[in-house]
Each structure stands twice: as structure tokens, then as C-alpha cells.
Image (cartoon, rainbow, N blue to C red):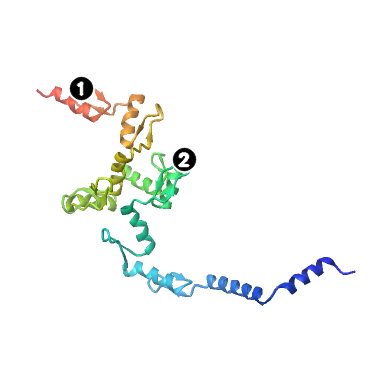
């Protein structure tokens, strides 16, 4: 008696034609190409499967930036980077949080934002134990402990912990304002300044008080508001020791000592 399983296998093999065999061969060839990286960078030794990938990589060494923004003149190594940059000018934010509806220009920014909802804080300061959502935020925080400021402005001498902070500062001297509000055409030095300004038009108040649910459009305003609940008075008079919630209140108070 013939084995039915053997008959099915034989029938299946008979049904497979040359096209199926060619497909399998092509898949094997693709796998072999992926495992073989025959295009190597002469500058750093990094290897690539395709020559086009090597050509794009070489721009890191040559400094070539063939993709230029027609709005502000900034240039980029990759076309994709230019497309992302253009969202600054167009205001396009295609990546939306399904928890709170907030939108972002980059997928990476959305992924970072999602940690606010999950409560995930991966980066911890080994000096004080404070935790941060981003490694960059931890790096910035560490300067509180080190007080190191290696980047100095050649025009006014002001020093900064990070090169990027110096670059932003230098725009004060040059007057460069690349970020424009499309609602009122007001311009700003940084994208963050523009983002804060736009809340005037949108009415967005992303910072909520955990004590009374009051909302604010700036994190600094929320921080000041919370002192009503905590009783914190961080501003003290050096003459009489009296403390105040706001720096402006301390400033007004010190005038009473001046005669």
C-alpha cells in the first residue's frame, strides 16, 4: 500500500515549476549579496553591500551636502534629511501621539514623547540620582555638577557647556532668525522659541499641575505655580532673610532696604 504522505510530497514537487526554482535561486543570491560587503570606504574601512551606499557614506568624509533648502539655504548630506528639515518651514507634523494627540515632525521625537506616557526614564545621573527621558538631557544636566564650560563666544566672552548652546547664543550677535511663525510672521532664533510662541495661536497648554489640574503653556510657569501648593520660597533677601515665591517679589522687597 502506498504511503499517502509520500504521494502528497511527490505531487507537490511535480507542481513546482521552473519559476519557483528561479525564485529560490534569486533569494539565495540576495542573501549572499547581503552577507558580502564588497564596497569598502578607503577613509575609515567601513564596508557596504551596494556601491550607492558607499557613495552616500563618502559625503561624511568629503563634507559634500548636495541637498539644499530653498527657504533658508541650509544644506544636507541626505535627501531624507532635507525632507525632514522642510517641515520646519511648512509646519508639517505627520507623526501623532495616539495617547494625547500631540503631533511631531519626526518619528524619533514621537518615540521620545511616548516615554512621558509610559513613565520610562532610562538615563540616571550617578551624582544625584535624577532620571531623564533622553541621554542628551542627562548630558546637559551633568554640567550642573561639573560646571565645565569649554565653549566661549569670541564676541562677548560668555561661556557655554555645549557647542550647540554657543551656536544658538551667537545668533544674538548675528541677528539670524531662521524660524518664522506662519500665523503672524514673527521670527525666532531657535525652533524651541518658535514652538513656545505658537502656543499663543493654538491655545495649547501642555503642562498640567498635578495638584489642581490647572494648565500652562510653559514649563517655567507651571514650576512657579506649584510653589503655591508646596510653599517653596526659593528667593531670599540677603539683608533680612525674608523669602519669596517669585524673584520679582524679592526685587520689590529689596527696595525697602534702600534709603
In percent of the image, x 39 and y 72: which residue is there? 55
Nearest the eye: 87 or 249: 87
Left or right: residue 148 versus residue 99 is left
Residue 235 on image: x %, y %: 25, 28
Quadrant holding the C terminus:
top left
Left or right: residue 1 versus residue 204 is right
Vertical placement of residue 254 versus 152, above or below:
above
For label 1, the residue is 240
Q: SS of the residue at dot 2?
A: helix
Nearest the eye: 201 or 247: 201
For label 2, the residue is 117
Nearest the eye: 94 or 47: 94
Q: Is residue 150 visible?
A: no
Residue 122 on image: x %, y %: 46, 45
Vertical placement of residue 45 versus 145, above or below:
below
In percent of the image, x 24 and y 49: which residue is there? 189
Vertical placement of residue 210 versus 85, above or below:
above
Quarter holding residue 28: bottom right
Q: CA distance from mark 2 to mark 1?
A: 44 Å
In percent of the image, x 17 and y 50: which residue is there? 157
Q: Report if the CB atoms under discs 2 and 1 are less than 8 Å apart.
A: no
The mark total stands at 2
Q: SS of the residue at dot 1?
A: loop
Residue 10 on image: x %, y %: 78, 72
Amino acid at each position: 500500500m502506498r504511503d499517502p504522505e509520500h504521494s502528497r510530497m511527490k505531487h507537490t514537487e511535480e507542481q513546482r515549476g521552473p519559476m519557483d526554482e528561479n525564485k529560490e535561486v534569486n533569494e539565495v543570491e540576495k542573501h549572499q549579496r547581503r552577507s558580502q560587503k564588497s564596497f569598502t570606504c578607503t577613509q575609515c574601512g567601513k564596508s557596504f553591500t551596494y556601491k550607492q551606499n558607499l557613495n552616500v557614506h563618502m559625503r561624511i568624509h568629503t563634507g559634500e551636502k548636495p541637498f539644499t533648502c530653498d527657504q533658508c539655504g541650509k544644506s544636507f548630506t541626505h535627501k531624507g534629511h532635507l525632507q525632514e528639515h522642510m517641515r520646519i518651514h511648512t509646519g508639517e507634523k505627520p507623526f501623532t501621539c495616539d495617547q494625547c494627540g500631540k503631533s511631531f515632525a519626526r518619528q524619533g521625537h514621537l518615540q521620545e514623547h511616548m516615554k512621558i506616557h509610559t513613565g520610562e526614564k532610562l538615563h540616571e545621573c550617578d551624582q544625584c540620582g535624577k532620571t531623564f527621558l533622553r541621554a542628551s538631557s542627562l548630558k546637559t544636566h551633568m554640567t550642573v555638577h561639573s560646571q565645565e564650560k569649554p565653549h566661549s563666544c569670541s564676541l562677548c566672552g560668555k561661556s557655554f557647556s555645549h557647542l550647540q548652546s554657543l551656536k544658538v547664543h551667537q545668533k544674538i550677535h548675528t541677528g539670524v532668525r531662521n524660524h518664522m511663525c506662519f500665523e503672524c510672521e514673527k521670527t525666532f532664533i531657535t525652533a524651541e522659541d518658535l514652538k513656545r510662541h505658537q502656543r499663543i495661536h493654538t491655545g495649547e497648554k501642555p503642562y498640567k499641575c498635578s495638584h489642581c489640574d490647572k494648565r500652562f503653556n510653559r514649563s517655567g510657569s507651571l514650576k512657579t505655580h506649584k510653589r503655591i501648593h508646596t510653599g517653596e520660597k526659593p528667593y531670599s533677601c540677603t539683608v533680612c532673610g525674608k523669602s519669596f515665591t517669585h524673584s520679582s517679589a524679592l526685587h520689590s522687597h529689596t527696595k525697602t532696604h534702600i534709603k
